Image (tube, helix red, strand yellow):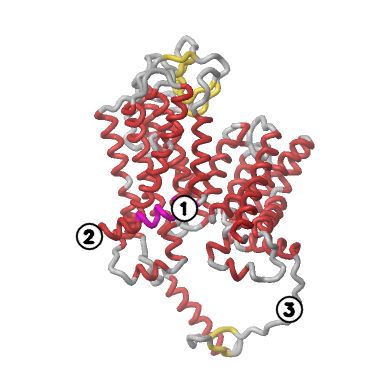
Amino acid sequence: MNAVVLPLTAQIGAELKMRLRSLATPIALVAFFAAAFFWIPDPHGNAASITWDLADGRVQAPLYSAAYVGFALAILSGIFLSMGGFYLVAGSVKRDRERGLGAILAATPLSKTAYLGGKFAAHFAYLLVLDLLALAAGLLTFVRYGVGSFSAVEFVGPYLLLTVPAIAAVSSLAVLFDVTPGLRGRGGLVIWFFVFLFGLVKLPIDMAGLGDDGAPTKSTMSRPWFDPSGIVTDQWMIRKTIPGGVKGVSTGHITRDKGIERVPWNGGRITGDLVAMRAFNLALAGIPLALAVLIFDRFDPARGGRRARKQGRLARLVEKLKDGRFAEVADADGFPVRAVALSPVAPHPTAKGAIYAEARLIWESATWIKWPLAIAALLAGLLPGNFAQGLFLVLLVPVISEVAAREKLAGTRALVFSQPGVPSSPALWKAAAVSVVVLMLGAPLAVKCFLVSPIRGLACLAGLCAVAGVSVGLGSLSSGGKLFSGLYLAVWYMGLSNLEAADFTSALSAHPVPMYSFLYMGLGAALVGGAVVRERLANA
């Protein structure tokens, strides 16, 4: 028993300490708390987290009881921890591989199941800590707006039933992504967003028989047996507690044109059906984990086909040597390598040259994704609507997300920053280089916005600068690109869904407000400034 428990607890402890010490955790918590206060608005206005329309045209929403506040927070946590939680935990297997720890683990008796099971448990424990900390936002909301007595059971019970299976699903899928070639890289950060959108949201909605307006397409709504994130279960629970004749149920931050009637609400009651469905979804988390165990190469390079590819390259190299196409030179291991004549170099290091070199490196290291990105950038300036613009903005993520932390992730920071001509502030250097890349690619979109109006054009440029600033600021502060990817994609999706406050380039929503683009640019500047201050404190 100890042979299993000790490695498991060691992994959980190490992962928790590392993540809780990272700046990504407090930044994510601040974003989560801000979203909670936005999600559960002032009950005296025309906005609510849950509303339903009666047949006579009235709009109703629950009073702010403990059951309602906890339930509304559960909806937000289900979305935030399902989508954004992935970006907070993914990449741990990749990190072990790149830092050489995987080779050490491969030489130990630790099995694939024990190793990946430990990663899953560590992910789950970390997200559970965030899940419980989020309850504080709900408590503050109840203190401010709550009515009636506070019931801990009504507040916490449905919350945990809805969010714990979501945490388990994300934890297991993060492990699966980490061990799957093609998904464990930067592109996987974008692919996950669409897996969440279509696999964890759209598919459960369709299976439960809900339409786009939130109303059942059949006579009754089916029980949501497949609903890892709990989003459809929310609707099912609400419909069981509201009057008949309801036209539609809406959840989220809903602003209505007419006044909202606040009525008592029994809350999401815990029933046998609910427990069974959430237990089933909790058990479903074992499927991605089992697939990950089957796929995982246990850090053996031969299983990934790398050895075969290397031997193939060596064989072709030997053939060239036999043909006399270049002179034979041996490396330290005795393998033949190409003889290269080095040309003389006369360096003239400057900050301008370093920015240009970094911008060029960003483009060249983007691999195949840069060509779809370039095409989407051109189409964003030529096509009407927001599809091309949205595609261009989402394809930026894998290209720029890790630029600020590239050297730290690769272990080359000391080597790179010891060279002459490299600017003294890495954050400002990276921000300038990323801005060059983003503005050059976004030029067609900016021109299109300028043709609409000069203020729209300036707002578009401000939004593009904001993208560069936020990516570098968050990347520098969190030492990675996952936090930026998660927050950026969430805002991008809300902008694409016509939320004016989330349209950071004034090119996504139907009625953009240019002021928001300048606010986002200010946020980007503040994050870069925070990264610069952190650099100076570290060097002091």
Say which of 431 and 153 sits in front. Answer: 153
Residue 465, position as x, y percentages in the image: 69, 47
SS label for mark 1: helix
Q: CA distance from mark 1 to mark 3?
A: 44 Å
Q: As displayed, is residue 60 above or below residue 387? A: above
Q: Which residue occupies the extreme top position in the image?
A: 56
Q: Which residue is mark 1?
A: 21
Q: As displayed, is residue 326 above or below residue 143? A: below
Q: Which residue is mark 2?
A: 2
Residue 374, position as x, y percentages in the image: 66, 53
Q: Which residue is mark 3?
A: 345
Residue 306, position as x, y percentages in the image: 44, 71
Quadrant of image for the C terminus: bottom right
Q: Residues within 10 Å of mark 3 (few under 14, many from 20)?
A: few
Say which of 163 and 507 sits in front. Answer: 163
Total marks placed: 3
The range drawn in magenta is: 12-22
Which amino acid, by three-letter code, is at mark 2? Asn
Q: Residue at x 48, y 82 (%)?
A: 315
Q: Nearer the viewer, mark 1 or mark 3?
A: 1
Principal secondary structure, stretch drawn in magenta: helix
Q: CA distance from mark 2 to mark 3?
A: 60 Å
Q: Earlier in the sequence, mark 2 or mark 1?
A: 2
Can residue 131 be seen from the camera position used here? yes
Can residue 468 be seen from the camera position used here? no
Q: Residue at x 49, y 52 (%)?
A: 22
